[in-house]
C-alpha cells in the first residue's frame, strides 16, 4: 500500500544550489500536484499535471520547474534555491470522478512531505 | 480570488464531546469541498468530499455539510476521542480547465483531552 511516495524526506540546501524532489504514485492517477505548506498560509499549489507529458502552473510557480515524463512520476525542480523556498513540500494525486468528466475529481491522496531548508 | 477561512484556529475539548469545525469560503462557484486531517509531521488524509450538488457526507463519526449559497461548510465530529487530535483543513475546488486546484484554509488544530 505505497500510495504516494516522496523522496527525500528532509534536505538542507545552500542558497543557489539546485535539487529535484521526486514524487511517485502507484494508483494509476491521471492528476498530480505539488503544494508547499508554510505556517499561517495554508497549502498553496505550485504546479500540477493532468496527464503524462503535460504540466501547468499553479498559484506560486516562480522558481520551480516540473516534469511528468511517466504517468506515475512527477518531479519538482529548484534550479537556484532561495531562502524563501524554505517550506514543507507535498505531492498529491487524484483522478477524475468517474462519470462526471474531467472537471471533477476523486479524493486527493498526499505524500508524507519533504522538509526543505535553504540557508 | 477565492479565500477560505477556518475558525477557530485551535480548539481543545474533553473526550466524548461532540464538536463542530467551521469553514467559510468567499466564492460560491465551487465544484466540491474536501475535509482533510493532518497529523504532525505527516501528509494530509482526505476525510470527506462533498460535491457541489450535495448537502452532506458522512463517514463513521464524521459528518460534513455544505451550504454553497452562504459559502459555509461544517465538519461535525461525534463522541470525540484523543485519537481525533490533529489539524483539520478544508479545501474548495475552484477547478477550471481540468485538474484539481484546491484552495486550502489554514486549518483548525484540535486537541481532545482525556
Image (spheres, coloured by chain):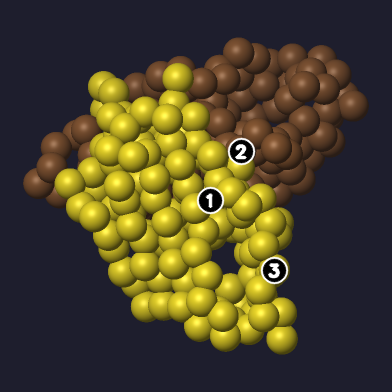
Chain colours: A brown, B yellow
Please report whichever mark, 1 or 3, sits nearer to the chain's N-terminal start.
3
At numbered mark 1, what does the secondary structure look like: helix, strand or loop? strand
Q: Quadrant of residue B108?
A: bottom right
**Residue closest to the eye, B27 or A84:** B27
A82 vs B4, left or right, is: right
Query: Nearer the observer, disc 3 or disc 2?
Result: 3
Dot 2: chain letter: A
Q: Nearer the viewer, mark 1 or mark 3?
A: 3
- Residue B68, placed above or below residue B82: above
Where is residue B38? Give x, y as percent. 59, 58
Q: Which mark is residue B89?
A: 1
Q: Nearer the viewer, residue B100 or A27?
A: B100
Count numbered badges in the picture. Answer: 3
Q: Secondary structure at mark 3?
A: strand
Classify the position of the N terminus of chain B by image quarter. Answer: top left
Q: Are marks 3 and 2 in contact (CB under 8 Å)?
A: no
Q: Quadrant of the C terminus of chain B?
A: bottom right
| Mark 1 residue crowding within 10 angstroms, few (<14) / some (14–19) / many (20+) | many
Residue A42's tag is 2
* B53 with respect to B28 (left or right): left
Do the numbered discs 1 and 2 sit on residues whose CB atoms are within 8 Å? yes
Between the C-alphas of marks 1 and 2, the distance is 9 Å
> Which label is found at residue A64?
none
Q: A118 and B37: which one is in front?
A: B37
Q: Position of residue A98 (x, y in %)?
A: 15, 49
Q: Residue furthest left?
A: A99
Residue receiving disc 3: B12
Q: Residues within 10 Å of mark 3 (few under 14, many from 20)?
A: few
Amino acid at each position: 500500500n505505497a500510495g504516494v511516495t516522496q523522496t527525500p524526506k528532509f534536505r538542507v540546501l545552500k542558497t543557489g544550489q539546485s535539487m529535484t524532489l521526486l514524487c511517485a504514485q502507484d494508483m494509476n492517477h491521471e492528476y498530480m500536484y505539488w503544494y508547499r505548506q508554510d505556517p499561517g498560509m495554508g497549502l498553496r499549489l505550485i504546479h500540477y499535471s493532468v496527464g503524462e507529458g503535460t504540466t501547468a502552473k499553479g498559484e506560486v510557480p516562480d522558481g520551480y520547474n516540473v516534469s511528468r515524463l511517466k504517468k506515475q512520476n512527477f518531479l519538482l525542480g529548484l534550479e537556484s534555491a532561495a531562502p524563501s523556498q524554505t517550506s514543507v513540500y507535498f505531492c498529491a494525486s487524484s483522478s477524475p470522478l468517474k462519470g462526471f468528466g474531467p472537471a471533477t475529481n476523486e479524493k486527493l491522496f498526499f505524500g508524507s512531505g519533504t522538509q526543505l531548508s535553504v540557508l | 480570488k477565492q479565500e477560505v477561512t477556518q475558525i477557530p484556529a485551535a480548539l481543545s475539548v474533553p473526550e466524548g464531546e461532540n464538536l463542530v469545525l467551521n469553514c467559510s469560503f468567499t466564492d460560491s462557484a465551487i465544484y466540491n469541498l474536501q475535509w482533510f486531517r493532518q497529523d504532525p509531521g505527516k501528509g494530509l488524509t482526505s476525510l470527506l468530499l462533498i460535491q457541489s450538488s450535495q448537502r452532506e457526507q458522512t463517514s463513521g463519526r464524521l459528518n460534513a455539510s455544505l451550504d454553497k449559497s452562504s459559502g459555509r461548510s461544517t465538519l461535525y465530529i461525534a463522541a470525540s476521542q484523543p485519537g481525533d487530535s490533529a489539524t483539520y483543513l478544508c479545501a474548495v475546488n475552484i477547478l477550471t480547465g481540468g485538474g484539481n486546484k484546491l484552495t486550502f484554509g489554514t486549518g483548525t488544530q484540535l486537541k481532545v483531552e482525556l
